[in-house]
Image (tube, rainbow, N blue to C red):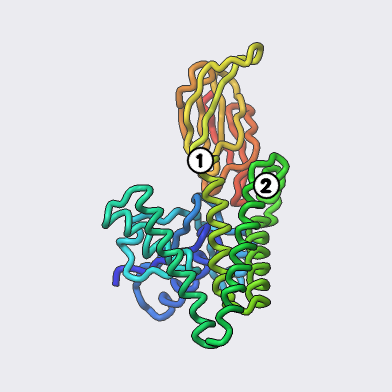
């Protein structure tokens, strides 16, 4: 066996803790075995304070961890892949191997995923039916209620996703570390589980439906707002674009400095310097956490705060 891979949604909480706990246990037993973790969503984020605190209570430090998206190479290298929900297992066992091995295209992949989803739902509904054959109608009705509730929640989430005030609340949540996205996803799960229980069907279908709602909304949101950002220079008098260049990651701020330079920080922890007049890239500095604070430039030094609770001072060369 060459390694174990834990897979969750954001690679910030569950898979991080599982990786750290198993690694610590294996080290205590003197077993040398690579253990890794990854997620389905965008990477570059540190674990939330709650995870850091819980693991610190067990004398395990996870502050250096940064989330990352699972790749085909990760799946190929691991001998054991542990998904923390059915959605994660489905992603690892079906989606990526199907693309790699069968070379399916977009419509064909959607067909395969629809078939797998249908098989999952039938399997979940079959469990209570086998245990209680006389309640087939009741179980089916419960499944329909959960599906209808999940569709309603998905539509509501997609409707609110593009609103400016929603984005402001999410940004404030990130700044204050309220973890609203996590709390709302748990609320969705609990609501669907309650409906499933009252409907007499398996609560497993609630977890499956909640996963589809959450991943579907986030992926659609990511598709609308891709990881690649753009840095634009506009004429202040006319509003006409002077230059426009793609930049990696979500750039949080753009701050002018002394001389012919402007500075940006992004969620990947990279501080970049650009030439004001042309947009040419001058230099980069990589920090240990997402640079989500405002950049201040004084005396030839750029100061910026990071999500790892540090302030970086970088010589600009000006």
Disc on res. 160 = 2
Residue at 50% x, 58% y is 65
Residue 273 lies, with reference to residue 144, above or below; the image says: above
Residue 201 lies, with reference to residue 102, above or below; the image says: below
Per the image, label 2 sits on a secondary structure element best described as helix
Q: Is residue 122 left or right of residue 179?
A: left
Residue 189 lies, with reference to residue 159, above or below; the image says: below
Of marks 2 and 1, the one in the foreground: 2
Quarter occupied by residue 48:
bottom right
192 or 284, nearer to the observer = 192
Could you tell me how far apart the alpha carbons at marks 2 and 1 are, in whole angstroms? 18 Å
139 or 44, nearer to the observer = 139
Disc on res. 226 = 1
Residue at 29% x, 54% y is 100
Query: Few, some or many C-alpha atoms within 10 Å of disc 1 (few <14, some 14-19, many ≥20)?
Result: few
The x, y position of residue 70, in whole percent, is 41, 56
The x, y position of residue 266, in whole percent, is 55, 39
The x, y position of residue 111, in whole percent, is 39, 56
């Amino acid at each position: 066996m060459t390694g174990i891979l834990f897979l969750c949604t954001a690679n910030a909480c569950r898979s991080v803790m599982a990786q750290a706990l198993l690694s610590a246990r294996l080290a205590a037993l003197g077993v040398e075995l690579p253990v890794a973790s990854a997620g389905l969503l965008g990477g570059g984020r540190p674990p939330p304070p709650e995870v850091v605190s819980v693991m610190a209570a067990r004398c395990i430090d996870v502050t250096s961890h940064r989330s990352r998206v699972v790749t085909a190479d990760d799946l190929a290298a691991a001998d054991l892949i542990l998904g923390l929900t059915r959605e994660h297992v489905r992603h690892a066992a079906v989606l990526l191997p199907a693309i790699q091995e069968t070379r399916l295209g977009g419509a064909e992949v959607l067909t395969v995923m629809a078939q797998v989803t249908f098989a999952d739902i039938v399997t979940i509904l079959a469990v209570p039916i086998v245990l209680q054959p006389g309640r087939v109608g009741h179980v089916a009705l419960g499944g329909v209620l959960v599906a209808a509730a999940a569709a309603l929640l998905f539509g509501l989430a997609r409707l609110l996703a593009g609103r400016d005030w929603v984005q402001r609340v999410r940004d404030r949540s990130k700044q204050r570390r309220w973890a609203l996205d996590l709390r709302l996803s748990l609320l969705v799960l609990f609501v669907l589980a309650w409906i499933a229980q009252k409907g007499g069907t398996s609560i497993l279908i609630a977890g499956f439906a909640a996963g589809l709602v959450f991943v579907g909304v986030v992926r659609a949101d990511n598709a609308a707002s891709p990881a690649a950002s753009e840095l634009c220079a506009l004429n202040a008098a006319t509003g006409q674009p002077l230059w426009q260049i793609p930049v990696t990651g979500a750039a949080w701020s753009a701050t002018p400095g002394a001389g012919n330079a402007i500075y940006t920080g992004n969620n990947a922890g990279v501080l970049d310097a650009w030439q004001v007049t042309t947009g040419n890239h001058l230099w980069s500095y990589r920090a240990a956490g997402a640079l989500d604070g405002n950049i201040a430039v004084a005396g030839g030094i750029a100061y910026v705060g990071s999500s790892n609770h540090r302030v970086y001072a970088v010589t600009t060369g000006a």
